[in-house]
Image: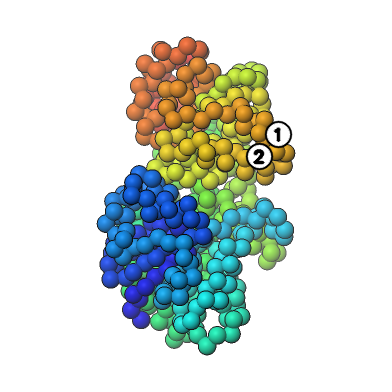
Amino acid sequence: MDIKRICCIGAGFVGGPTMAVIALNCPEIEITVVDNNPERISAWNNKNLDLLPVYEPGLKDIIKKVRGKNLFFSDKIDDAIISSQMIFMAVNTPTKIKGKGKGMAADLTFVEKCAYQIGKVSTDDKIIVEKSTLPVRTAERIKKILESFDKPINFEVISNPEFLAEGTAINDLFKSDRVLIGGDSTIEGKKAVSSLVKIYSRWIKRNRILLTNVWSSELIKLASNAMLAQRISSINALSAFCEKTGANIEEVSKGIGLDSRIGPKFLKASVGFGGSCFQKDILNLVYLCEYYNLKEVAEYWHQVVKINDYQKNRFSNKIIESFNYSIKNKIITILGWAFKKDTNDSRESASIYVTEKLLGAGAKIKVYDPMIDEKRVYSDLRIFLEYRGLSYKEIESKISSVSVYSDYKAAISKTNAIAILTEWDEFKSYNWKNLIKKMSLQYKIFDGRNIINSDDVNSKIYKLGITQFKNI
């Protein structure tokens, strides 16, 4: 079947960029991205492309070319569903915060609501594409919901998980390592898969499009994220060992990465991984392993998350220890709130964890990030502190000790320590030696990216690991 009309439910970090790239490469297909958040839709339709709700290098150039031509953003979800032939589900699947599986299992509330809405309003055959990262056999649940309406129409559910790294999402979409499509082996299932293959084949080489069954496709996404996170936790565990023994984690990482069987990617020590995927997906995998009574397997993967938490706590403790555990009313500047550079996504950012730890020790916090505003910082902290079980009064009391700046010079002025937690290129460009000379107090600089001891701040400030600069 030739697809002429696509609907994508979810206008976030996955739905927006993915549909923009499809629209650019398939001008004959009319694509409507829908969301029940009118503010987000309004932001996607903003004439000022610098105010798009998702920041990705190269994204606004594509939006400029396709928006209003064959790419549209709307909050009229039912209309878009009814008129489409293919529907992408790109909604959030956070970790459950209550009920069975709390703290580990994926919350499929939004996915199930989407399936219900699609089943309720559809009047003809639809191909449903799972784009969100989902537990194995979620497609089965989706299909049951769709078929519960007992309509004389056919729904084919296929899995097409995203493999986008925020900050490089557009490049990832154009030059994918692989496009994964999982479908049923029935005649209709194969036709649905073929329709999606035809779309991607417009710009992706056929040998990079991998076809599997639905369950394998769902698991491959979870397993890929778990393996990548495992590498980060492994090198972070070694960074702690290096600090005790005098080994250099940068040299160790390089030596390991030169092994062709291993390679250098994801072997940079850091404060710990963040973002919307790694921790959520690993915990989901842990839950599924426990569900199938694979306790040893579950504990193996759970340890990856535990090391990540350990690394964030270790970094926070290094700052506290440097003040001889007397950090009350000390002013600490956090440079970087996004979980990585070139994105305005702060979900699960190490900065949130480090800030909470320092606030708990009595410090006052200044924050600067080039892409994240005051509203988002305070929202992240409120959500995190509420999850920690603090009362409204306790949360507001802690947040009153946090100041957010739109100018880095104001953020680093009259502070006692600087913690660089996001690898923004902007931070590397600062003339740190001149800045330090102008500092009115004795500064300590903590770079969450490397274990080194050097006066050459500008050349060393950005290598990944845990660094403490004292009295420079």
Image height check: is 243 above or below 386?
above
Name which quarter of the figure residue 307 lies in: top right
Residue at 42 percent across and 16 percent down: it is 436
Structural distance between the alpha carbons of marks 1 and 2: 9 Å
Relative to 111, is 268 above or below? above
Q: Is residue 425 above or below residue 185?
A: above
Q: Quadrant of the C terminus?
A: top left
Q: Are marks 1 and 2 in contact (CB under 8 Å)?
A: yes
Q: Which mark is residue 131?
A: none
Residue 286 percent coordinates (x, y)? 63, 57
Q: Quadrant of residue 292?
A: bottom right
Q: Secondary structure at mark 1?
A: helix
Q: Nearer the viewer, residue 168 or 257?
A: 168
Looking at the rendered image, the disc whose residue lies closer to the viewer, 1 or 2, is 1
Question: What residue does disc 2 label?
Answer: 385
Amino acid found under the numbered disc labelled 2: Leu
> Visible in this render: residue 303?
yes
Residue 64 location, x and y as percent?
Answer: 29, 53
* Residue 372 left/right relative to 399: left
Q: Which residue is mark 1?
A: 394
Residue drawn at (47%, 45%) of the image: 345
User: Is residue 94 or residue 373 the one in the foreground?
Assistant: 373
The answer to whether residue 465 of the structure is visible from this angle is no
Q: Earlier in the sequence, mark 1 or mark 2?
A: 2
